Amino acid sequence: MFEKLFEDSLWASRFIVLLAVFFGLVGAIILFIVASVDIYETTMFVIRTYLAQAHPEHFHEDVVGGIIGAVDFYLIGVVMLIFSFGLYELFISDIDAAKDESGTGNKILAIHSLDQLKDKISKVIVMVLVVGFFQKVADTQYTNPLDMLYFALSITAVSIGLFFLGKVGKH
């Protein structure tokens, strides 16, 4: 009897994961809102600049930086969504609303193991890092040929890494 009570309590303790699911969703929503506000502010900056027929210094860098920063937030928001969906499906239940009439469902957010969750999150995190890298590259001043060589080598390294990441995901 004690064993059954203990096992039932232990099994019910998995519902603590709902805290991570809920706050992961809240975090994703916040990131999506912040990114959307950033895009809106960048849009308004561009409109005001063209209406004033002005062309401030670093205009293009500011616009690209604002948009890339927003994409970065969107991608991190996606990580939070995948994390929340994955934890829920692993510890609580399959998400019935994600299934279609045939019963197969949406494969994008379907998580059946911790390895799948880790794999999906790591791929999005790599994309976040790539976007962050390009944001830093856009802000960098290149003053000599060696800087340009380093720039070319870093782009090559990122490209090779993404190529191999794609190869690993297909096997």
Image (cartoon, helix red, strand yellow):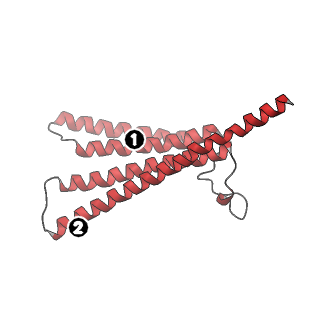
Is 131 left, or right, of 52 in this rendering? right
User: Which is more N-terminal, label 2 or label 1?
Assistant: 2
Q: What secondary structure is found at the residue carrying circle 1? A: helix
Which part of the image, by quadrant, shows the N terminus?
Answer: top right
Residue at 41%, 44% (x, y): give it. Answer: 128
Disc sitting over residue 12 in the figure:
none
x, y percentage for residue 68? 33, 51
Residue at 66%, 47% (x, y): give it. Answer: 89
Disc sitting over residue 129 in the figure:
1
x, y percentage for residue 51? 17, 70
Residue at 33%, 59% (x, y): give it. Answer: 39
Task: Determine the image quadrant of residue 155.
Answer: top left
Give the vertical position of 50 relative to 16 (above or below).
below
Identify which residue, 143 or 3, lies in the foreground. 3
Amino acid beneath label 2: Ile
Task: Please tell me how crowded label 1 is: few (under 14), some (14-19), or many (20+) other residues with Cα within 10 Å.
Answer: some
Disc sitting over residue 47 in the figure:
2
Task: Determine the image quadrant of residue 64.
Answer: bottom left
Tell me if I can see residue 112 in this picture: no
Q: Nearer the viewer, mark 1 or mark 2?
A: 2
Identify which residue, 79 or 115, lies in the foreground. 79
Is 89 left, or right, of 65 in this rendering? right
Q: What secondary structure is found at the residue carrying circle 2? A: helix
x, y percentage for residue 6? 78, 31
Task: Please tell me how crowded label 2 is: few (under 14), some (14-19), or many (20+) other residues with Cα within 10 Å.
Answer: few
Which part of the image, by quadrant, shows the C terminus?
Answer: top right
Give the vertical position of 92 relative to 150 (above or below).
below
